[in-house]
């Protein structure tokens, strides 16, 4: 991958970075195919939530574009824990399946922690099993959640040096904030994690060299220019 140097005030183009990563992955898949290995991702979606269905569809489309085979498991909203556990167990034992992704959130009758823990750590592409969460915290990760990985890839692509930087991250979720904290720390950044209960958020942001937000569409939070160091914009 060709890396680029970014200037202050320059827009970071996520699509450009994504396309560069896809090219690398496509080549990697072709190499595996030459060795008679067909990488396969299995997804599990419980219920008919439109947003979740869209996320799963996009994942299948992305896999198709780079040559990864997919298996799509759609389960009714009243699926029991035992039924879901059996599906995951079967996928764990399926030698043709290399990655398993259970779309979250799950219906209320299902236990997310138990479900995720059921996935084999070597097929846990979301990096959410207790084993993979622990390995990430120790800097020995096999799989990293996608959003933190994408953010780190953008830093690498644009040659943004994180060492010694004060970074404010406004998110504390298991999928984004917590794993990203460890990845930033492993790159010698000083990381402050903020969230909906953080007091004096403006002051934290004003002292930050880098601000990362992932709060969704929440009316209570807006990142405005007066919250950012003048030198950053």
Image: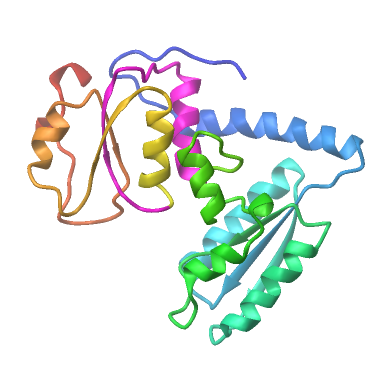
Image quarter for residue 169?
Answer: top left
Does the magenta portion include 112? no
Quadrant hosting residue 7? top left
Q: Which residues are magenta?
A: 145-174
Quadrant (top left, top right, bottom left, bottom right) of the C terminus:
top left
| Residue under the point 39% across and 16% down | 161
Q: Which residue is drawn at the image coordinates 28% and 20% (left, top)?
A: 165
Give percent across and percent down for residue 194: 22, 44
- Determine whether, in the image, residue 117 is placed left or right of residue 27: left
Q: Is residue 155 magenta?
A: yes
For residue 26, side relative to residue 186 (left or right): right
Which image quadrant: the N terminus? top right
Residue 162 image point, x, y percent: 36, 20
Percent of width and height locating residue 197: 15, 54
Q: Nearer the viewer, residue 159 or 11?
A: 159
* Image: 77 above or below 40: below
Q: Residue at x 50, y 33 (%)?
A: 139
Left/right of residue 187 with respect to residue 28 in the rendered view: left
Work out whether 173 lies above or below 46. above
Establish if 7 lies above or below 189: above
Question: Residue 31 location in percent, x, y?
Answer: 83, 32
């Amino acid at each position: 991958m060709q890396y680029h140097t970014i200037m202050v005030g320059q827009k970071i183009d996520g699509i450009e970075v994504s396309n560069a990563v896809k090219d690398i992955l496509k080549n990697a898949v072709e190499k595996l195919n030459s060795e008679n290995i067909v990488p396969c991702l299995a997804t599990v979606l419980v219920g008919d939530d439109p947003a979740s269905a869209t996320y799963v569809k996009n994942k299948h489309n992305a896999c198709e574009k780079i040559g990864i085979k997919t298996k799509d498991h759609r389960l009714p909203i009243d699926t029991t824990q035992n039924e879901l556990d059996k599906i995951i167990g079967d996928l764990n034992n399926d030698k043709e399946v290399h990655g398993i992704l259970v779309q979250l959130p799950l219906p209320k009758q299902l236990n997310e922690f138990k479900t995720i823990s059921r996935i084999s750590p070597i097929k846990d592409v979301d990096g959410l099993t207790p084993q993979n969460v622990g390995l990430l915290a120790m800097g020995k990760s096999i799989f990293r959640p996608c959003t933190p990985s994408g953010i780190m890839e953008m830093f690498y692509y644009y040659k943004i040096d994180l060492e010694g930087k004060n970074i404010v991250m406004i998110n504390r979720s298991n999928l984004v904030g917590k794993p990203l904290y460890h990845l930033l720390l492993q790159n010698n950044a000083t990381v402050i994690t903020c969230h909906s209960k953080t007091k004096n958020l403006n002051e934290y942001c004003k002292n930050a060299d880098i601000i990362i937000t992932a709060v969704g569409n929440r009316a209570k939070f807006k990142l405005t220019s007066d919250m950012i160091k003048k030198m950053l914009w």
